[in-house]
Image (cartoon, helix red, strand yellow):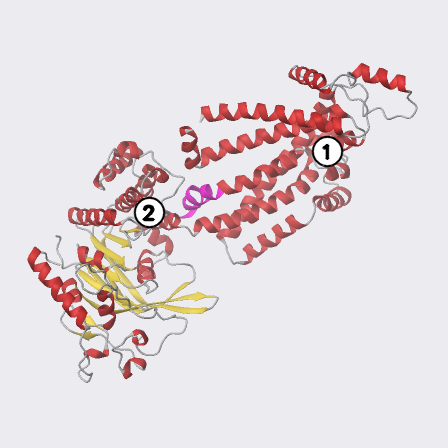
Amino acid sequence: MKKYVAKRVITAIFTLLVILLVLFILMQLMPGSPFNDEKLTADQKAALYAKYGLDQPVVVQFFHYVVNMLRGDFGVSYKISKNTPIAQLIAVRLPVSIAIGGYAVALGALVGLILGLIAALRRDTILDTLCTVISVIGVSVPSYVFALALSFQFGYKWHLFPMLYNTAEALNSSVLPSVSLSMFTMASIARFTRTEMLEVMGSEYMLLAESKGISGGALIFRHALRNALIPIITVLAPLIVDLMTGSLVVEKIFSIPGVGSLLVNAIQSNDYNVVISLSFIYSAMYIAIMLVVDILYGIIDPRIRLAKDDA
Amino acid sequence: MAEYNEKILDIKNLDITFKTIAGPIHAIRGINVDLMKGETVAIVGESGSGKSVTMKAAMGILAQNAVVNSGTIEFTYIGDNGEKETVDILKQSKTWIRKNINGRRISMVFQDPMTSLDPTMNIGKQIMEGMIWHYKTPKQEAYDKAVQLLKEVGIEDAEKRMKNYPHQLSGGMRQRVVIAIALACDPDLLICDEPTTALDVTIQAKILELIKKVQRERGISVIYITHDLGVVAKVADYVNVMYAGKIVETGKINEIYYDPRHPYTWGLLSAMPDLDTDDDRLYTIPGSPPNLIREPAGDAFAMRNRQALVVDDKVDAPMFKITDTHYAATWLLDPRAPKVEMPIELKHRIERMKKEAEDYGSTI
């Protein structure tokens, strides 16, 4: 297992370098530049290019970038917030997005799992139908509709939670956006859990466990859920990354200072460094989460764990 | 072998219907089976004849859509207070059955060892689980007993194997593990649902030997569910031939093999592969079992039976007594019936089998 993790981490580092290179080339290919202001003369532009090192060949730029990044320097923003180091720009916004996304994932996965379990265990009853209806709504209604509805009901009418994000009471203001973001995850996980549990419960080894006399919670959690969890985690992993990286629309509705809106602004204004840094962080998060998921697989599924040891 | 006089399982007039979207399926149509202590009974029949359903009813693990219309399954055991008790399993709650019957007193070995072990739990835990669950056996004691069980079912390096997961074992070894799991709580009755069907032929014989050995050493009763008359010949004392949810012939092993009376039994025996025959075709019973959504009037086998009588299409035959232990449900045994003999090929074959048995001094 340790060997496997080490191997995966090294692969991840190489993957990240490649991603960085691709991002860099894509940025070069993008039309326009951060200094598109018509008032600037050609000389002034050249001065700006020289100042930020944009006049140098791409290879040199890339080399500088990687070296600086290793020192924790992501460069400065050209446009959005002139000359602010990007690390500083992201440092205030990323935790907000990660926190809200994290709550949403935790909430969605937990509630989804419970709903799916209930639906599977009470198959073909009114509870099952209810869970199915909830998950169909969750999957088909977009998160901003939930966001608006929740904001209206709980924020505007009942004053239970703030309608707009307030850094002073971060937790309280995260509730509504987290709930609205969690709906899709919850619904997908519920549907998936139901299907997987039904399949596992119909299997021979469940019959064998029952014929041993095992019943109740031990039967469900020790035998059924553990086997059902393996495919559920596969579905959950990409959803986690999706939520953690911030949702533009929900961020706008609750005016959350997250990274979703920052990325869109940066793309629109050709703020190269911001775009690359954010894309890079997204990729890093994605790779990290996938690594965690793979390790989790190993813990749950001995077939994978033991195969890895041999590798 | 143990004493034969104590009745351990007595299934009377069992009748089960499955509710399906297509309509009710009358899968078990009034069957009677009994089993004495230490004895081996085989239930033989084609797929879908209701063999497994009967035994799942005795284990309380019937599918949700099964409805028991009538009948009793009386099971006799030594209760916790040391006294003999008899219960009707069908009248007990699921909780009671799980607590008192499953694993503890009746265990089951399933058909396919590739799918009947939990892939995420090591086999040691799977064997220990039942003991800890039923008797709160301390972990170390359960572990020692599990190692002992693995040795008993013929697994080498038992201690090392305890930590193995099912996917690390071969099919034959997995079936041995399944048997070890079944034996973990010292049951009185072992139900083997086609225990060798999914295994290759060389392993089949070994597993049958193992079950026989376990039975001999522990003096437990065994019920075999199988469609393989070859398996039955090796292991059973009594045979019940089942067709379309009914038992059509029942008797001692010799009576069924050497003096079969029901045309369906004739068909089954004729369909056994045989190396010593001039005929290079393998006999098969024409047609397929009836769909029990539309229950046939009269004898369910009539439409596949070349020797069927007119009465077979109208009224189902009762059990006719041949000897004290041998009964068959066919109108051919009625005094008014025309004299119909079993097919001549089968007759020759039986004579050959008898002679072979005498030559080898076998007792089947």
B91 in magenta: no
As displayed, is residue B26 above or below residue A50? Answer: below
Locate residue A263 relative to residue B217 in the image: left or right: right
**Badge 1 element:** helix
Q: Which residues are magenta?
A: A214-229
Residue at 34% x, 43% y is: B133
Q: Residue furthest right?
A: A39
Say which chain tag 2 marks. B
Q: Picture quarter containing residue A305? A: top left
As displayed, is residue B72 above or below residue A287? Answer: below
Q: Which amino acid lies under the numbered mark 2 shown in the image of this protein? A: Pro
- Of residue B260 and residue A202, the one placed in the foreground of this image is B260
- Location of residue B309 in the rendering, given as x and y in whole percent from the top left corner: 26, 81
Locate residue B178 relative to residue A278 in the image: left or right: left
The lab-note entry on whether marks 1 and 2 share a chain reads no
Locate residue B358 relative to residue B6 in the image: left or right: left
- Location of residue B217 in the rendering, given as x and y in whole percent from the top left corner: 16, 46
Name the residue beneath numbered marker 1.
Answer: A260
**Badge 2 element:** loop
Is the C-beta separation of discs 1 and 2 under 8 Å? no
Name the residue beneath numbered marker 2.
Answer: B113
Q: CA gap, disc 1 to disc 2?
A: 52 Å
